[in-house]
Image: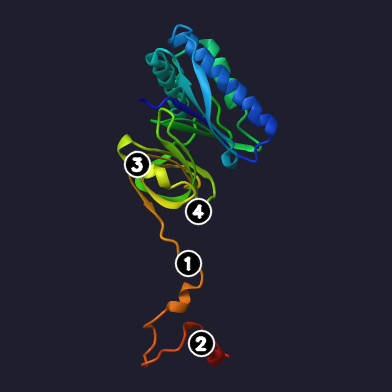
Amino acid sequence: MPDTTVILALEGEVRLNQFVEAVQHFQKLLWQLTQEVANSVEIQWELDDLQYGSALMAVAGHADDEETVLKVIAAFEQVAYSLQHDEPIPYSRSVLKVVESLTKLIGGEVRAMRLSTAKTEAILYAGFNTEQRPSPKPMVSFGSVKGRVQSISNRGKLRFTLYDVLFDKPVSCFVDEELQATLTDIWDEMVWVTGRVTRQPDTGQAFSVREISHIERVRMVSSGSYRQARGILAGTTHPEPAEVSIRRLRDAEG
């Protein structure tokens, strides 16, 4: 089943009223695109994820005719692409006005805004202007991200949110069906996720992983395991405990 998720995320010290306003413009953009490309077919947008770490909201579209939802997703992707690449948005003035209202929120506390789907995303920074200044493009490369799994969704798609260990920010991970079994027992686990990683161009912070090839649990070191250390000093038949050796070396340095 195709993934019909669209994501809005704000970066920075985001106030509640700013996020509420962004959500309202985001909802209006989806509605306006539906009027233009899907003959006003009724689409139910269900809340799929909500993460406070980056003021991130994901919604998934549902309708009797799945093709109409996919048309709206494709139109949303076109809007995001046009914004990212400083190209004209190929829709009506009504769509453009909603986009302008949404992107005007970037600046001050809202350092950046992301518009994403399962296939692609755009990231827009403070100082961005729909007519004068394009935003720097995200960095995309094959690599790995380490973090803790916080939420998993399999309602018509396979996606989970990872909080990375470097920035403690949510990373959206989109999974193909062949790795579905892997998701059953990784919730709240520390894992390495390997795939096509998209990062912010200014900080290198990862915010999505697609085309995932491997998910590997991180082997956690148990507390006090250093006491089992062996082989670091010339030995005797009965080696002294690690803590005694450490204390003796410390005292010798003093």
Label 2 and label 4: CA atoms lie apart by: 33 Å
Identify which amino acid the numbered label 2 is placed on.
Val
On the rendered image, what quadrant is the N terminus found in?
Answer: top left
Identify the image quadrant of residue 71.
top left
Looking at the rendered structure, the secondary structure element under dot 1 is loop
Q: Give me the disc on residue 244.
A: 2
The residue where tag 1 is placed is 222
* Residue at horizontal 54 percent and vertical 87 percent from the top: 247
Q: Are marks 3 and 2 in contact (CB under 8 Å)?
A: no
Q: Give me the disc on residue 181.
A: 3
Q: Nearer the viewer, residue 156 or 166?
A: 156
Q: For label 2, count other residues whose C-alpha is less than 10 Å away and answer few (under 14), some (14-19) or many (20+).
A: few
Decide if residue 231 is in sight here: yes
* Residue at horizontal 57 percent and vertical 40 percent from the top: 54
Looking at the rendered structure, the secondary structure element under dot 2 is helix
Identify which amino acid the numbered label 1 is placed on.
Ser
Q: Of tags 4 and 1, which is closer to the observer?
A: 1
On the rendered image, what quadrant is the C terminus found in?
Answer: bottom right
Of mark 4 and mark 3, the one earlier in the sequence is 4
Number of numbered markers: 4
Q: Of tags 3 and 2, which is closer to the observer?
A: 3
Identify which amino acid the numbered label 3 is placed on.
Ala
Label 4 and label 1: CA atoms lie apart by: 18 Å
Q: For label 1, count other residues whose C-alpha is less than 10 Å away and answer few (under 14), some (14-19) or many (20+).
A: few
Of mark 3 and mark 2, the one earlier in the sequence is 3
Looking at the rendered structure, the secondary structure element under dot 4 is loop
Q: Give me the disc on residue 144.
A: none
The residue where tag 4 is placed is 165
Identify which amino acid the numbered label 4 is placed on.
Val
* Residue at horizontal 65 percent and vertical 27 percent from the top: 20
